[in-house]
Amino acid sequence: MRNEHEMTVDFYEQALRRVRFLAGAVGLSGTIVTLLAYDLRTAIGFMLGSALSILNFRGLSMLVNVIGGAKPGAFAAVLIALRYLLIGCAIYVIVRFLGVTPGAVVWGLLAAFAAVILEILYELIFRIHE
């Protein structure tokens, strides 16, 4: 008999969907709060940082799938290998050429981390009652 709390592929797919949704929600709400509290340039920095965070999370998800046995395309393999170099270059361009505050970009980069923490809390609060 199967344990109802057993980790299945469906469980992981649902959790990943929630994390992606939550990362977008954190990025959007953080951008709005930053716009209201600071200015447009700082909000753009936060938004671009959160977009990089979401892209990095997707890259990490692809990496995990590759380790799990899925075959990546050539383009995906190159992105996995160069992920942090590309993120570093993007941050440099955002800060240097767009004149965005580095702090706003760094805070935006934490969007996926916040989404993962929210997913953990969701599982702890709601799954324990099932």
Image (cartoon, rainbow, N blue to C red):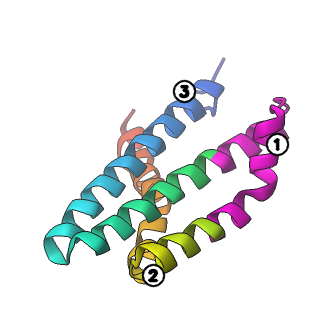
- Neighbor class of circle 2 (other Cα within 10 Å; few <14, some 14-19, many 20+) is some
Query: In terms of sequence position, does the residue under pointer 3 or pointer 2 come before the other?
Result: 3
Q: For residue 61: magenta?
A: yes
Q: Which residues are magenta?
A: 59-88
Q: Is residue 70 left or right of residue 94?
A: right
* Residue 102: mark in rendering: 2
Work out whether residue 75 or residue 123 is closer to the camera in this orientation and state it. 75
Prevailing secondary structure class for the magenta stretch in the rendered image: helix
Q: For residue 78: magenta?
A: yes
User: Disc 3 to disc 2, how far (Cα)?
Assistant: 45 Å
- Tag 1: residue type? Ala
Query: In terms of sequence position, does the residue under pointer 1 or pointer 3 come before the other?
Result: 3
Inspect this view and state whether residue 68 appears: no
- Tag 2: residue type? Pro
- Tag 3: residue type? Glu
* Mark 1, residue position: 77
Q: Where residue 126 sits in the image (x, y, percent)? A: 36, 41
* Residue 4: mark in rendering: 3
Inspect this view and state whether residue 25 appears: yes
* Residue appearing at x 50%, y 62% in the figure: 113
Tell me the SS state at disc 1: helix
Residue 104: name its quadrant: bottom left
